[in-house]
Image: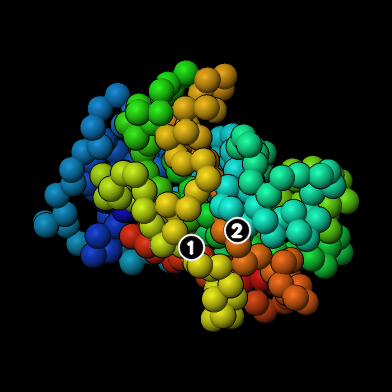
Amino acid sequence: MRFVTFMYQGRETAGIYTDGCYPFKDVSGKGDMSLLDFIRLCENEPVPGFDTKNLKPIEPDRLLSPIPIPFRDVICLGKNYADHAKEVVETKLETQDSDFIPKAPVYFNKRAYPAKGDMDEISLHSHLTNMVDYEAELAVIIGKTIYNIAPNQAEEAIFGYSILNDVTARDIQTKHGQWFFGKSLDGFCPIGPCIVSRDEIPFPVNLDICCKVNGEIRQKSNTVNLIFDIPYIISEISKGITLYPGDIIATGTPAGIGHAMKPPKYLAKGDKVECEIEKIGRLTNFFI
C-alpha cells in the first residue's frame, strides 16, 4: 500500500494512492488526519484495508513529502556502503583518520523541518556554499514505540519505506568537522514520493537504488550491500533511544557522490536530481 500527502484545493491532505489519490477521510471512516497521525493510529492495530471501488480518486494539485514536518530529526547512517565508505576516506571528507569500513555504525542527525517533497525546488544556498551534493538513500519509517529490541523484532517495528536525498554542502561538512550543519540547510532533506507499507517489500530488504543528475546515472547499487543492515540498525539505536511511530531512519548512500568524481561535479542551478528505489518509485527535485 502506498501512502501520500498532497495539496488539494489549497489544503494539505493525506491518504492512499492506488489508481489515484484517496483522502483518509473518504476511505478510513475515521475522519481527516495527517499521515503522521495515521502511522500513530496504526501502532497498536494492523494497517486497515481500504475499499475504493465505489469512490472516485482525486487529482492532487501537487505531492508533498509524506511527512512534511517530521517531529524529530532524521537519524542517518554515514559510510554504510563499502564503496561509499572508501570514497569518503579517499576524498578526505572526514577530518580524522579512518578505516575504509567502519567497525561500528556512523550515526548523525539531519534537520528536516520541513521536508521537501517530490518535484519541489531546493535552494543551493549559493551565498553560503558552492559544493552542494546528492545522496540517494532508503528511508525506514518506524511504526511502533520500541526500546531495546532484538534484531529479529525489527521488521515488526517498521511502518514502511520511502526515498530520501541526503543533500549535503561538502565545504560546510568538512569545514566544521561534523556533519549536522552541512546536511541540514533549509530544504536539504527531500523525502518521497510516498511511503510504501512494509508488507509490500519482502524482508530482508533487497532493492535496487540509483541516483541520476540531468539523466546521467551517478549512483547505482542495491540495499543488500548495506554494511549494517536494517535489523541491526534499528536494534542498536533502540538499545538506548526510544523510537516512536513516525521516526525516520536514513540507511546510507552508495558510491557515486559528485564530490568523489574527477573532477568533482557539484550541483548547479537548474540541475534535476532523481533518486530511484525499486518498488518505491522516484523522488525528483530541481535545484535553484
Quadrant of residue 279 within the rendered picture: bottom left
Taking the spot 14% from the left edge, 49% from the top edge, the residue there is 51
Taking the spot 22% from the left edge, 46% from the top edge, the residue there is 27
- Asked whether, in this view, residue 283 is left or right of residue 24, the answer is right
* Label 2–label 1 contact, CB within 8 A: yes
Between 170 and 44, the residue placed more toward the observer is 170
Crowding at dot 2, Cα within 10 Å, few <14 / some 14-19 / many 20+, comes out as some
Between 53 and 92, the residue placed more toward the observer is 92
- Asked whether, in this view, residue 164 is left or right of residue 185, the answer is left
Question: What's the amino acid at mark 1?
Answer: Ser
Question: What's the amino acid at mark 2?
Answer: Asp
Helix, strand or loop status at disc 2: helix
Q: Which label was assigned to residue 83?
A: 2
Image quarter hosting the C terminus: bottom right
Cα distance between the residues tagged 2 and 1: 10 Å
The answer to whether residue 131 is visible is yes
The answer to whether residue 102 is above or below residue 93 is above
From the top left corner, tell me how far across and down residue 274 is, in percent. Answer: 53, 70
Taking the spot 58% from the left edge, 47% from the top edge, the residue there is 80
Helix, strand or loop status at disc 1: strand
Between 211 and 183, the residue placed more toward the observer is 211
From the top left corner, tell me how far across and down residue 234 is, in percent. Answer: 47, 32
Query: Mark 1 sits on what residue?
Result: 221
